[in-house]
Image (cartoon, coloured by chain):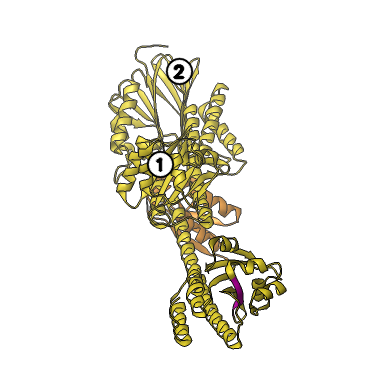
Chain colours: A orange, B yellow
Amino acid sequence: MTGTTAEVALSGELDISTYEDALAQLAAAERSAPELLVVDLAGLRFVDSTGVRLVLSADERAREAGRRLALRLGDGPARRVFTALGLVDRFEVLD
Amino acid sequence: MSERESPASALQRLAGELLRATSPAAIGALVATTAADLLGADAAAVFARAGATTLEALHTSGWPEELSRPFHRLELHRGRPLSDAVLDGHPVWLEDAAQWRLRYPDMAALGTAADMQASACLPLRVEDRDLGAVVFSFRGPRAFSAEEREFLVAVTALCAQGLDRARLLVAERTARETAERQLGRMTVLSRTTRLMEAPLSVEERLRQLADLAVAEIADWCAVHLVRGGRVDQVAVAHSDPTKVAFVAQLQERYPPDPDAAGGALRVSRTGEPAYYPEIPDELLTAAAVDDEHLALIRSIGMRSAVVVPLAVRGRKLGALTLVQAESERRFDHIDLAFAQQLATTAAIALDNARLYEEQWRTAHTLQAALLPTDLPAVPGLRLAARYRSPADTDVLVGGDLYDVVPEPDGCGVVVADVCGKGAAAAALTALIRHTVRAEIDHGHGPAVVLERLNRAMLRASGGRPGRFATVAQARITRTPSGATVRLASAGHPPPLVVRGGRTEAVSARGTLLGVYPDVTLTEVTFDLNHGEIMVLYTDGVTEARDADELYGPERLERAVAPGGPAGDVADRLLADVDAFQHGRQRDDIAILVIEADAEVGP
C-alpha cells in the first residue's frame, strides 16, 4: 500500500450550515486510510472559521494516523482566509 | 305462553335467531327466553365462564329479581348442581323437590324456591371448549323422559355453538380493534417525536401536538405549562373551532379552580395523573359554581378523561389533558398508559428545549460579563467600543472580545474572536481576556503577550489542538504628537488606520492561536497623530452578508474613511453593517476605535 491518494473537493459555501456535509465527505475519504488526502478548497465561494476548524481537525487526524493531508487553495476565498490566519505555511499546499 | 309450534320448526327458528346474534349477551337472552319457551321451561339462566373458577350470568328469566340477583356471579363449587354439570361436563337432572333434597340438601330450598321443582342443569360445551352452563327450571315435578332429555341436550348444544361463535366474533373484533388502536397509537407517538423536533416555538409545537391528539385519539385536548409560579393553558384543541371558542368563553367567565382535584392545574403542580374512565354527572355538579355553569359544562358532553403530567427527570413542566365527549368513546387503562407515554415524549423534548435556552442564556450572561461595562478613561486617547450579538435565539453566542487595559503611559488594547459558539467558546474568551490582562500588566510587548496566550490556550485544551482564536493586541503609548502603536496580530483581520480621509490596513502577519505550539508573530509600530484613528474589529464586520455578497474590506474602509470622533466612527460603522445585512446578523460583531485626542497633550 504505497502512494494511495484520495481527494475531496468542497464547493459552494463552507460554514456552520454546511459543516456536517463537508465533515461527512472527509470522513468517507478517511475511511479508506489514504496515504495522502487532498482537500480541494479552490472551488469554495465562502469559508469561515468553522471551515478552517474542519480542515485543522482533519489535519490533526491525519497526523495522528501517520497520513498526510494537503490542500488546494485556488486563488479565491480559501487562500485569502488561510493566508490571513497565518496557516498557508502550516500546510502542504499543492497550488 | 304461545301455542306450541312443532319442535322441529321451533328449533329451526331458534337456530336462525342464534345465527343472527353477534354477542354473548344476545345469545344468552335468546337461550333464556326463546329456547326456554321452546322447552316449556318456566325459568332459565345462562352463565358464561368468566375465569377458571367463576361463572357470570348472561341472562336470567322467570325468577323474581331478588332470587336471581345474587347469582350474577357464581364461584364454581362442587356439590352444587350447576357446578357439577360444568365440572363433569354432564347434565344434572332434578325431577322434583324430593330429588333436590336427596342429592343437594344444602341447595334444595333455593333450587325449589318460587314454586320451581324440576331443574335441568346443562353444560355449554363445544368440543373441548367449556363455555358455561344453562339451567332450565319447571314449576311442578317433571319426569325428564329420554326423548325430552335428548331434546334439551340438542337445544343446549345449539346454544353452545351460538355462544362459541359469538365469543370468537367478539375476540376477533377486540383483537382487530386493539391492533388498530395500537397502530394508531404508534403513529401518534412517532408523529409526536417528529413534531417535538420541529424548529418551532415550544407553544407552537404544543398546539400542534393538541391538534394531532384530537385528530387521532381524543375529542378534546388541552396542554398546560408551568411558568414560574403560574400554570398557563397554552393549547386547547377540538375538531370544531366553535367548540374551542365556546370553552374559551366559558373559562373566561368561570376561571378554573387552581386547586380542583384532578384538574390540569393541579396535575401540573403535583405530577400525579388523574383518570376518569367515566365522568358521572355528580362530578360536573360538584365542579359547577352555579346552575348556569353546570348547564354550560354539561353541554360540552364530557364522557371520559385523562390528565397526565408533562414531567421529566422529576421536573414538573405541565399537563396534557385528553377528553372524550360526543364520540362516546371511553378511555381505558391502556389509553391512560399511552397518554403518559405521549406526555413523556413531549416533556423530554420540552426539557431539551429548556436546557438549550438556559445554556444560551448562560453563555450570553458570561459573554456580557467578559466585556468591559465602561471603557476606562485614558488621557490623550478617545476610545469607543461597540458589541452586537445576533438577536436570533437560535444562534448561540460567539466568542468575540474587546478590552482596554490602562497603563501609566497609555494603554493596552485587545480584540479577539474565538472560533465556535456556546458556553465552551465563552469560557475560552474568558481565558483570553484574563491572560492578556495579566501579560500586559507584566509589561510584555504585543508579540510576547500573544505567544504566552497561545501557550495558555494549548495548556487549557490539554495539549491537543482545541478551539482557535484570532487576536489583535496593541500597546499604545502617548507621545507629544499623539501616540505610538505597537501591534501584533495572530491571524486577526488587519486594523485600519484613518489619516486625513485616507484609510490604510495595517498588516502584522501572524498565526492564529490555540493550535500550534510554535506561532509566527510579527510586530509593527506606527504613529497616530492628533485626530488620527485606528479601528480594530472582528470578522463579523467584514463577513456580514446581504443576499449575495460579503460586506468586505472595501465597504469597511468607506464607512470609516470620513474619520471624526471615535464614537461617531464606531456608530457609523455598526449602522452601515446593520443596513447592509438588513438586520439579519449571523455572527457577533466587535468594534474598537482608538483616536489620538487632538485636545489633550502628554
Above or below B391: residue B281: below
Span shown in magenta: B116-125
The C terminus of chain A lies in quadrant: bottom left
Residues B34 and B105: in front is B105
Image location of residue B291, percent across then percent down: 37, 38
Q: Residues within 10 Å of mark 2 (few under 14, many from 20)?
A: some
Q: Give the quarter of the image for residue B137.
A: bottom right
Sequence-wise, which precedes: disc 1 or disc 2? 1
Q: Is residue B587 magenta?
A: no
Disc 1: which chain? B
In front: mark 1 or mark 2?
Answer: 1
The N terminus of chain A lies in quadrant: bottom right
Q: Residue at x 49, y 71 (%)?
A: B29
Q: Main secondary structure of the magenta part?
A: strand
Position of B541 with respect to B314 (left or right) is: left
Label 1: which residue? B234
Q: Secondary structure at mark 1?
A: strand
Image location of residue B399, percent across then percent down: 47, 35
Position of B265 with respect to B300 (left or right) is: right
- Please say whether residue B519 is visible from this viewpoint: no
Image location of residue B575, percent across then percent down: 30, 30
Q: Secondary structure at mark 2?
A: loop
Disc 2: which chain? B
Label 2: which residue? B376
Above or below A29: residue B426: above
Q: Give the quarter of the image for residue B552.
A: top left
Residue B541: mark: none
- Please say whether residue B434 is visible from this viewpoint: yes
Question: What distance separates the C-alpha of mark 1 from that of mark 2?
Answer: 48 Å
Q: Residues within 10 Å of mark 1 (few under 14, many from 20)?
A: some
Asked if labels 1 and 2 share a chain, the reply is yes
Three-letter residue code for mark 2: Pro
